[in-house]
Every structure is written in C-alpha cells, then in structure tokens.
Amino acid sequence: MNTTERKLLTSLLSSVPSGNLHDAVNAMWQRGLLNRVAIERLYIQNEVNRRVRGGEAKMRAIEQISSELGCSYEKVRGVVYSK
C-alpha cells in the first residue's frame, strides 16, 4: 500500500462508525463507497464454490444462484468461469 492509498484508507476509516464492523460496512454501503459489482462477483464465486464442495453440481449451483439473485444464468456463469 502506497502513501496515497494509506491517506485514502485513513480518511475512509475516520468517516465510519468505529467498533462494530457490521455498522462500518453498512455506513460505507449507504454512502456508496463499496463496489456492488465486485461484492456481487465475490458472493457468486464463494457461493458456487461452497455449494460444489457440498456436493451440488456446478451447473445446478449456477442455476440456483442466478434465480436467487434475479439475474441471468449467463451472468453467473461468466463470473464463475472468468479468471
């Protein structure tokens, strides 16, 4: 992390409630400081991996997650297979 990144992080941390991670993340979400697309991609990747480890077929996991998120199968599949 370079000096500029440290300054930006310090500013961010000083602008959110301290002590409770959930409250801090919620405050950042409400202010639009979090990248929703990146978080959605992380969720999809983690959830597919969790389901596959639990024995579910990857295709079925992708179908279920796309339904749960209200998005296309192709979108979820694209996230899963992109590197």
Image (tube, rainbow, N blue to C red):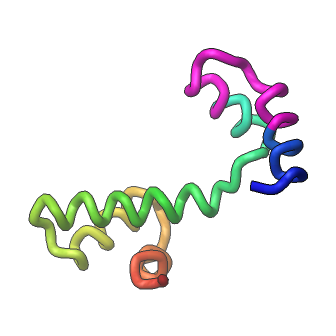
Q: Nearer the viewer, residue 82 or 36?
A: 82
Q: Is residue 67 left or right of residue 29?
A: left
Residues in magenta, as a range = 10-25
Look at the image and say whether residue 76 sits in the magenta stretch: no
Which residue is at 63% across, 62% downward? Answer: 37
Q: Nearer the viewer, residue 74 or 36?
A: 36
Say if 46 sits above or below 28 in the image. Answer: below
Which residue is at 58% across, 19% downward? Answer: 20
Tell me the quarter of the picture where residue 10 sits.
top right
- Marks counted in the figure total 0
Q: Is residue 30 left or right of residue 57?
A: right
Look at the image and say whether residue 21 sits in the magenta stretch: yes
Q: Is residue 69 left or right of residue 2?
A: left
Which residue is at 81% across, 56% downward? Answer: 2
Q: Nearer the viewer, residue 53 or 65?
A: 53
Tell me the quarter of the picture where residue 28 sits.
top right
The chief SS type of the magenta part is: helix
Q: Nearer the viewer, residue 58 or 9?
A: 9
Say if 10 sits above or below 69 in the image. Answer: above
Residue 40 image point, x, y percent = 54, 59
Residue 27 image point, x, y percent = 72, 29
Tell me the quarter of the picture where residue 9 sits.
top right
Say if 26 sits above or below 3 in the image. Answer: above
